[in-house]
Each structure stands twice: as structure tokens, then as C-alpha cells.
Image (cartoon, rainbow, N blue to C red):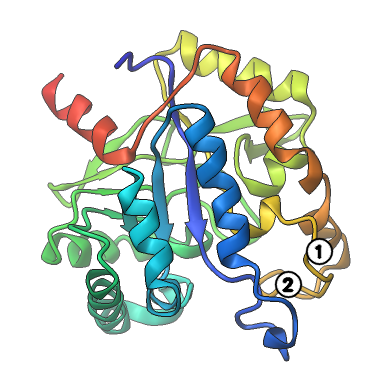
Amino acid sequence: MKTNNTFLFSVDLEDARENVHDGHKYQDRVVETTLLYLNWLKKNNSVCTFFSVGKIAEKYPELIKEIVMRGHEIACHTYSHTPIDKLGKDGFKSDLEKTLNALSKSGAGKIIGFRAPVFSLTEKTQWAYEVLSEFDFVYSSSVLPAKNPLYGWKNFGNQHKIMNGKIIEIPMTVGKFVHLTLPIAGGIYFRVLPKIFLFNEIKKCIKNNRPVLSYFHPYDADTGQEKFMHSGINGNKIYNYLMYYNRKNLFSKLDEVMKMDLTITTYSNYINTLLKA
């Protein structure tokens, strides 16, 4: 596997209805939309990493089994998508125990990877690496190396680092758009940002021997979900509008990205390549 054309495509398995007032009165579309990603990956002969919350594993164990059966990796995304600063150190430990138990029961296999909800691993929550080490995690993809209204670690840098002497942190890929530093290939940003900007940033990653990291959610591909105010965005109507923007073109845009000679792989495969280097 080339390391300078690696596409760390990933899916954060969570239910957008959670933590929404009366959210479960809306359609349950997690399985249906996750299958869209699985079929797109199959079309591209690729396997990737699915970061799952524990609640998804408990509610849809057959979906987890299907993902694993198709050769993909399951990683941890906490139990119910609570930012780690809201959990605190002891709460984070309890959350990981509960999540890993749920993932194990669903047939997820050995879990070595972690992603913090909303990229909530920052300078103030570095204690999380100590906790992750206690649970024998190998890697994390939890840092947004930029200033952000929600969470961000501005001075982390673009390269992976070994944290707490053990955990390999692979930060999200960001690029400068006008006066903003944004995650170029993640969720809303991938759907909203102009192609010319996106493709130029991917070329920079290839040139500088950096992987392109992305994250998507079941809802990013969902064109049939009823509209509601999503949680975690402080009731911002503009941001909520963007939550639905351009979902219909997600896979066609991804098809164009794949023409750039990128290779999708799991985080664990990429980590193995790093460790052998």
C-alpha cells in the first residue's frame, strides 16, 4: 500500500435522532443509509473503518456483523456520542467499558481504534490518552487541528503523533479556505466545499506524503429523512440547513475523488504500515 495516496475514508455510526427532542418520532434510517456506504465501498473494492457508538451496536448487532463480514474494521466512538469533556476522566472510563462491552457482544472483534465525538479531544482533555492506554487502544483519530466553534486543537499540527507514549493520534485533514481552517473531507464540509478547493487540498496531501482523512455519517447520505433541528449545534439554523445540504451528490463527489488514484484502507492497516516503516 502506498502511504502517499491513502484515503482514510471512515463512517461514524450514530443515529442523528438521538438527543433530539422527540427524535424517535422520525424515521429510523441508520441501517438503510449505512448499507449505501457498504455498497459504495464494495463497488470500489475497498474496506474502511466504521467508528460505532455503543448504542448502535446494541440496537443493530446484525448491522455490525454485516460490516465485519464484509471485511471492514469496527472502532469505538463512545456509547452515546457524548463529548469527552462532558464525561470527565472517570465518566470516560465507565463509558469505554460500556461501549467495548456492547461492541464485543455485537461481534465487532478486537477494538484498537477510537474517535472522540465532535473531535472533543483537545489540549484540555489530553488525560483521555492515559485512559485509552489503560484499555489497550492503539490509535485515535480524535483531533481537529484547527480553531473551531465547538472543539479544536489549533497547534496540534498535521502529522500523526504518539501520545502518552503509546496512542498514535492521527489528526483530521484540514485545509485553509479563505480565512478558515476546515476539515476538507468530512461530512458537511465535504458536501459544501467547492470541488476545486477539495481536489487541490487532496493533491497537497499526496505531494506531502500525508493520508487524506475523512469522516461521514449515515445521515450524510440520507435524502429521505424528515428535517429536524439536529442536536449539538446550539440551535443554529444556518448550520442545521447545512446538515441537509447536497446529500444527494455525496457519492458522485466521492466517485470523482476516487479518480485521483487514492486507495481506501482501514485505520488499522494504515497503522500497521506506519509501525513497519
Query: The N terminus appears in which quarter of the rendering?
Result: top left
Q: Which residue is mark 2?
A: 230
Q: Position of residue 124 (x, y in %)?
A: 39, 64
The reply to whether residue 94 is in sight is: yes
Q: Amino acid at mark 2?
A: His
Where residue 228 sits, quadrant-wise, is bottom right
Where residue 239 sits, quadrant-wise, is bottom right
Q: Residues within 10 Å of mark 2 (few under 14, many from 20)?
A: many
Mark 1 lies on a secondary structure that is: helix
Mark 2 lies on a secondary structure that is: loop
> At x 20% / y 59%, what residue is drawn?
109
Seen in the picture, residue 141 relative to 59 is either above or below; the reply is above
The reply to whether residue 154 is in sight is: no
> At x 67% / y 86%, what residue is drawn?
24
Pointer 1 or 2: first along the chain: 2
The foreground one among 146 and 16 is: 16
**Viewed as shown, does residue 56 lie left or right of 250?**
left
Query: The C terminus appears in which quarter of the rendering?
Result: top left
> At x 62% / y 57%, what residue is drawn?
33
Seen in the picture, residue 20 relative to 38 is either above or below; the reply is below
Q: Position of residue 48 (x, y in %)?
A: 40, 40
Seen in the picture, residue 98 relative to 150 is either above or below; the reply is below
**Viewed as shown, does residue 277 lie left or right of 77?**
left
Q: Tag on residue 90?
A: none
Q: Amino acid at mark 1?
A: Asn
Q: Residues within 10 Å of mark 1 (few under 14, many from 20)?
A: some
**Viewed as shown, does residue 89 lie left or right of 200?**
left
> At x 31% / y 42%, what residue is drawn?
71
Mark 1–mark 2 distance (CA, rounded to whole Å): 6 Å
Q: Tag on residue 240?
A: 1
